[in-house]
Image (cartoon, helix red, strand yellow):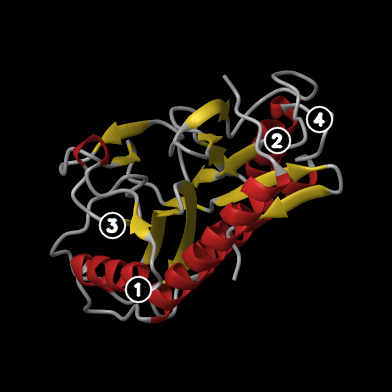
């Protein structure tokens, strides 16, 4: 069941989204080669609590961290650990928080120091996929339009859109209906309506889109060892167009 939010509820979610965006931004600014991913997890937790919000991921289905911190071929749900970052890595920071009973969720893939041109292209194309998906996030459009925008642009650039994971609705729960796929057919799927709040999250792979469970028991990594890139925002659908709630 899709839960429609009121303007007042969306306004509260926007407050939480602004906090989350700042927390993720400041955590990203702390990234240095040689840092352990669990150090970033501690920074994100401290910033969240200082802002008066609650962490959302720790304890969710047994997840041990505040942040999902994926490196290179690692995908979503990677647990923080003693892994040290290296110059040239790409790092995905994926985080959720709770603000006045409402969940917010976002992710960014960033470079660790200078990265090569192929990694720069992957980050750029994934960002473009996200921007194209946002243009389809309007009242009267369908979820298949969002998925197609992501898939089509990824494939035109020689990449693939993940099939085994997806975006989602969000609100009083971290994961609500509907599922927001990274692939699709235009004009198909549930219709987008005013008051829906969804997480759009292009997950783009350099190689095959197939994934495997990581050694930590939580992460989903590329099966062929190719790079994985991920951008996510919490989006409200309004009569004036999409509103990105997770921006500072």
**Whole-number angstrom distance, CA of label 2 to CA of label 4:** 8 Å
Looking at the rendered image, the disc whose residue lies closer to the viewer, 4 or 3, is: 3
Can you identify the residue that label 1 sits on?
47
The image shows residue 15 at horizontal and vertical percentages of 57, 62
Question: How crowded is the residue under tag 4: few (<14 C-alpha within 10 Å), some, or many (20+)?
Answer: some
| Label placed on residue 2 | none
Q: Quadrant of the C terminus?
A: bottom right
The image shows residue 51 at horizontal and vertical percentages of 40, 72
Question: How crowded is the residue under tag 3: few (<14 C-alpha within 10 Å), some, or many (20+)?
Answer: many
Answer yes or no: do the residues labelled 1 and 2 have beta carbons within 8 Å? Answer: no
Can you identify the residue that label 3 sits on?
66
Q: Is residue 96 above or below residue 238?
A: below
Can you identify the residue that label 4 sits on?
141
Looking at the rendered image, the disc whose residue lies closer to the viewer, 1 or 3, is: 1
**Whole-number angstrom distance, CA of label 1 to CA of label 4:** 37 Å
Which residue: 53% across, 69% down? 117
Q: Is residue 116 left or right of residue 216?
A: right
Answer yes or no: do the residues labelled 2 and 4 have beta carbons within 8 Å? Answer: yes
């Amino acid at each position: 069941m899709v839960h429609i939010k009121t303007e007042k509820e969306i306004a509260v979610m926007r407050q939480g989204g602004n906090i989350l965006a700042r927390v993720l931004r400041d955590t990203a600014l702390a990234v240095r080669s040689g840092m352990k991913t669990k150090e970033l997890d501690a920074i994100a937790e401290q910033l969240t609590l200082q802002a008066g919000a609650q962490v959302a991921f720790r304890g969710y289905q047994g997840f041990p961290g505040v942040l999902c911190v994926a490196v290179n071929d690692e995908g979503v749900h990677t647990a923080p650990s003693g892994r040290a970052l290296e110059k040239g890595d790409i790092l995905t920071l994926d985080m959720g928080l709770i603000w006045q009973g409402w969940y917010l969720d976002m992710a960014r893939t960033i470079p660790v120091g200078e990265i090569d041109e192929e990694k720069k292209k992957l980050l750029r194309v994934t960002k473009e996929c996200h921007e194209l998906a946002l243009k389809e996030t309007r009242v009267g459009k369908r979820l298949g339009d969002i998925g197609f925008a992501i898939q089509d642009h990824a494939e035109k650039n020689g990449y693939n859109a993940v099939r085994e994971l997806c975006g989602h609705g969000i609100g009083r729960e971290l994961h609500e209906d509907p599922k927001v796929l990274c692939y699709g057919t235009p004009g198909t799927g549930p219709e987008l309506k005013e008051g829906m709040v969804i997480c759009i999250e292009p997950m783009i792979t350099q190689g095959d889109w197939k994934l495997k469970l990581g050694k930590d028991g939580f992460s989903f990594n590329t099966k062929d060892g190719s790079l994985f890139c991920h951008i996510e925002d919490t989006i409200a659908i309004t009569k004036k167009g999409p509103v990105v709630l997770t921006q500072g």
